[in-house]
Image (cartoon, rainbow, N blue to C red):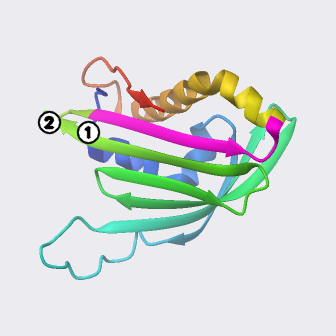
Amino acid sequence: IIGYTPEQIFDVVADVRKYPEFLPWCDGATVHQDTTTSPPPPPPSPPSPPSSYIQAELVVGFRGLLSEQYTSHVHMRRPELVRQSTSDSRLFKELESQWSLEPVGSDATKLRFAVRFGFQNALYQSAAELFFAEVVEHMVAAFEQRCATLYGPPSRGSASSNDE
Protein backbone atom coordinates (compact mmCIF):
# COMPACT_ATOMS: atom_id res chain seq x y z
CA ILE A 1 0.00 0.00 0.00
CA ILE A 2 1.37 3.39 -1.00
CA GLY A 3 0.02 6.66 0.40
CA TYR A 4 -0.65 8.30 -2.97
CA THR A 5 -3.68 8.05 -5.25
CA PRO A 6 -3.58 5.80 -8.33
CA GLU A 7 -3.74 8.94 -10.47
CA GLN A 8 -0.67 10.40 -8.78
CA ILE A 9 1.37 7.21 -9.11
CA PHE A 10 0.18 6.69 -12.68
CA ASP A 11 1.22 10.22 -13.66
CA VAL A 12 4.74 9.65 -12.30
CA VAL A 13 5.15 6.23 -13.97
CA ALA A 14 3.72 7.50 -17.27
CA ASP A 15 5.98 10.57 -17.43
CA VAL A 16 8.76 8.82 -19.34
CA ARG A 17 10.37 12.14 -20.35
CA LYS A 18 11.24 12.81 -16.69
CA TYR A 19 12.84 9.42 -15.95
CA PRO A 20 16.43 10.72 -16.21
CA GLU A 21 15.65 13.22 -13.43
CA PHE A 22 14.92 10.58 -10.80
CA LEU A 23 15.29 7.00 -12.00
CA PRO A 24 18.59 5.23 -11.19
CA TRP A 25 20.49 4.08 -14.25
CA CYS A 26 18.34 6.11 -16.68
CA ASP A 27 20.63 8.56 -18.45
CA GLY A 28 18.29 9.71 -21.21
CA ALA A 29 14.73 9.57 -22.56
CA THR A 30 13.57 10.74 -25.97
CA VAL A 31 9.87 10.30 -26.73
CA HIS A 32 9.14 9.56 -30.40
CA GLN A 33 5.42 8.84 -30.17
CA ASP A 34 2.91 9.91 -27.53
CA THR A 35 -0.84 9.47 -27.70
CA THR A 36 -1.41 10.65 -24.12
CA THR A 37 -1.99 14.23 -25.27
CA SER A 38 -4.28 13.30 -28.18
CA PRO A 39 -8.02 13.29 -27.64
CA PRO A 40 -9.21 9.74 -27.00
CA PRO A 41 -11.21 8.00 -29.74
CA PRO A 42 -14.97 7.69 -29.27
CA PRO A 43 -15.74 5.11 -26.58
CA PRO A 44 -16.75 1.64 -27.74
CA SER A 45 -19.84 -0.03 -26.33
CA PRO A 46 -19.68 -0.70 -23.46
CA PRO A 47 -17.33 2.17 -22.58
CA SER A 48 -13.89 1.23 -21.27
CA PRO A 49 -11.15 3.46 -19.89
CA PRO A 50 -9.18 5.14 -22.68
CA SER A 51 -5.75 3.75 -23.32
CA SER A 52 -2.65 5.52 -24.54
CA TYR A 53 0.79 4.67 -25.86
CA ILE A 54 4.27 6.12 -25.66
CA GLN A 55 7.28 4.98 -27.65
CA ALA A 56 10.56 6.29 -26.31
CA GLU A 57 14.24 5.68 -26.67
CA LEU A 58 15.79 5.21 -23.24
CA VAL A 59 19.48 5.29 -22.38
CA VAL A 60 20.66 3.28 -19.38
CA GLY A 61 24.06 3.45 -17.78
CA PHE A 62 25.79 1.56 -15.01
CA ARG A 63 28.50 3.45 -13.09
CA GLY A 64 30.16 4.68 -16.26
CA LEU A 65 30.94 1.10 -17.33
CA LEU A 66 28.06 0.71 -19.72
CA SER A 67 25.73 2.94 -21.66
CA GLU A 68 23.09 1.38 -23.86
CA GLN A 69 19.90 2.54 -25.51
CA TYR A 70 16.72 0.69 -26.34
CA THR A 71 13.18 1.36 -27.47
CA SER A 72 10.53 1.26 -24.78
CA HIS A 73 6.89 0.65 -25.70
CA VAL A 74 4.60 1.87 -22.93
CA HIS A 75 0.91 0.97 -23.02
CA MET A 76 -1.24 2.69 -20.42
CA ARG A 77 -4.78 2.73 -19.12
CA ARG A 78 -5.18 5.65 -16.70
CA PRO A 79 -5.16 5.33 -13.74
CA GLU A 80 -4.91 1.58 -13.31
CA LEU A 81 -2.26 0.05 -15.57
CA VAL A 82 1.12 0.75 -17.17
CA ARG A 83 2.80 -2.00 -19.25
CA GLN A 84 6.24 -1.63 -20.75
CA SER A 85 8.08 -3.80 -23.26
CA THR A 86 11.39 -3.38 -25.04
CA SER A 87 12.67 -3.71 -28.59
CA ASP A 88 15.78 -2.70 -30.54
CA SER A 89 18.08 -3.56 -27.67
CA ARG A 90 21.61 -4.87 -27.72
CA LEU A 91 21.50 -5.00 -23.91
CA PHE A 92 18.22 -6.78 -23.15
CA LYS A 93 16.97 -10.00 -24.64
CA GLU A 94 13.68 -9.05 -23.01
CA LEU A 95 12.50 -6.42 -20.57
CA GLU A 96 8.86 -6.20 -19.56
CA SER A 97 7.25 -4.53 -16.61
CA GLN A 98 3.75 -3.92 -15.37
CA TRP A 99 2.38 -1.49 -12.79
CA SER A 100 -1.11 -2.34 -11.54
CA LEU A 101 -2.73 0.34 -9.41
CA GLU A 102 -5.84 -0.22 -7.30
CA PRO A 103 -7.36 2.48 -5.07
CA VAL A 104 -7.42 1.93 -1.32
CA GLY A 105 -9.80 4.48 0.16
CA SER A 106 -9.49 8.00 -1.24
CA ASP A 107 -5.77 8.59 -0.71
CA ALA A 108 -3.80 5.37 -1.14
CA THR A 109 -3.04 2.68 -3.69
CA LYS A 110 -2.42 -1.02 -3.68
CA LEU A 111 0.57 -1.27 -5.99
CA ARG A 112 1.66 -4.39 -7.81
CA PHE A 113 4.88 -4.11 -9.77
CA ALA A 114 6.14 -7.03 -11.83
CA VAL A 115 9.23 -7.11 -14.00
CA ARG A 116 10.74 -9.76 -16.25
CA PHE A 117 14.10 -9.33 -17.90
CA GLY A 118 16.87 -11.15 -19.70
CA PHE A 119 20.21 -9.77 -20.83
CA GLN A 120 21.91 -10.60 -24.13
CA ASN A 121 25.21 -10.96 -22.26
CA ALA A 122 25.45 -13.96 -19.89
CA LEU A 123 27.75 -12.05 -17.50
CA TYR A 124 25.23 -9.21 -17.15
CA GLN A 125 22.45 -11.77 -16.69
CA SER A 126 24.31 -13.50 -13.85
CA ALA A 127 25.09 -10.21 -12.10
CA ALA A 128 21.51 -8.99 -12.48
CA GLU A 129 20.10 -12.20 -11.02
CA LEU A 130 22.28 -11.73 -7.93
CA PHE A 131 21.02 -8.20 -7.37
CA PHE A 132 17.49 -8.48 -8.81
CA ALA A 133 15.58 -7.76 -5.59
CA GLU A 134 17.82 -4.79 -4.76
CA VAL A 135 17.44 -3.32 -8.27
CA VAL A 136 13.63 -3.62 -8.14
CA GLU A 137 13.58 -2.11 -4.65
CA HIS A 138 15.68 0.86 -5.83
CA MET A 139 13.44 1.42 -8.83
CA VAL A 140 10.19 1.37 -6.85
CA ALA A 141 11.75 3.60 -4.18
CA ALA A 142 12.75 6.10 -6.87
CA PHE A 143 9.15 6.32 -8.09
CA GLU A 144 7.91 6.69 -4.50
CA GLN A 145 10.44 9.46 -3.86
CA ARG A 146 9.32 11.20 -7.05
CA CYS A 147 5.74 11.10 -5.75
CA ALA A 148 6.93 12.63 -2.47
CA THR A 149 8.78 15.37 -4.37
CA LEU A 150 5.73 16.22 -6.47
CA TYR A 151 2.88 15.62 -3.99
CA GLY A 152 4.40 15.82 -0.52
CA PRO A 153 4.63 13.08 2.10
CA PRO A 154 2.46 9.97 1.66
CA SER A 155 -0.94 9.96 3.30
CA ARG A 156 0.01 6.82 5.26
CA GLY A 157 2.96 4.49 5.71
CA SER A 158 3.93 2.74 2.51
CA ALA A 159 4.62 -0.96 2.14
CA SER A 160 5.45 -1.73 -1.50
CA SER A 161 4.62 -5.09 -3.01
CA ASN A 162 7.06 -6.35 -5.62
CA ASP A 163 6.26 -9.40 -7.73
CA GLU A 164 8.58 -11.68 -9.72
In this view, the residue farthest toward the right is 65
Residue 81 placement, left or right of 121? left
Depth order, front residue of 52/145: 52
The amino acid at mark 2 is Ser
Q: Which residues are magenta?
A: 110-122
Residue at horizontal 29 percent and vertical 47 percent from the top: 7
Quadrant of res 26: top right
The local secondary structure at tag 2 comes to loop
**Please, what is the dominant secondary structure of the magenta stretch?**
strand
Q: Residues within 10 Å of mark 2 (few under 14, many from 20)?
A: few
Q: Is residue 131 above or below residue 77?
A: above
Does residue 150 show up?
A: no
Quadrant of res 156: top left
Residue at horizontal 38 percent and vertical 26 percent from the top: 161
Task: Indicate the position of residue 114 as horizontal and vertical percent values.
Answer: 45, 39
Task: Indicate the position of residue 61 as horizontal and vertical percent values.
Answer: 77, 40
Say which residue label 1 marks.
5
How many numbered circles are shown?
2
Depth order, front residue of 43/149: 43
- Label pair 1/2, CB-CB below 8 angstroms: yes
Q: Is residue 161 magenta?
A: no
The amino acid at mark 1 is Thr
In this view, the residue farthest toward the bottom is 42
The local secondary structure at tag 1 comes to loop
Say which quadrant the N terminus sits in: top left
Residue at horizontal 28 percent and vertical 27 percent from the top: 3
* Numbered circle sitting on residue 106: 2
Task: Indicate the position of residue 24 as horizontal and vertical percent values.
Answer: 64, 34
- Ranked by sequence position, the earlier of labels 1 and 2 is 1
Q: Is residue 109 above or below residue 6?
A: above
Residue 152 placement, left or right of 121? left
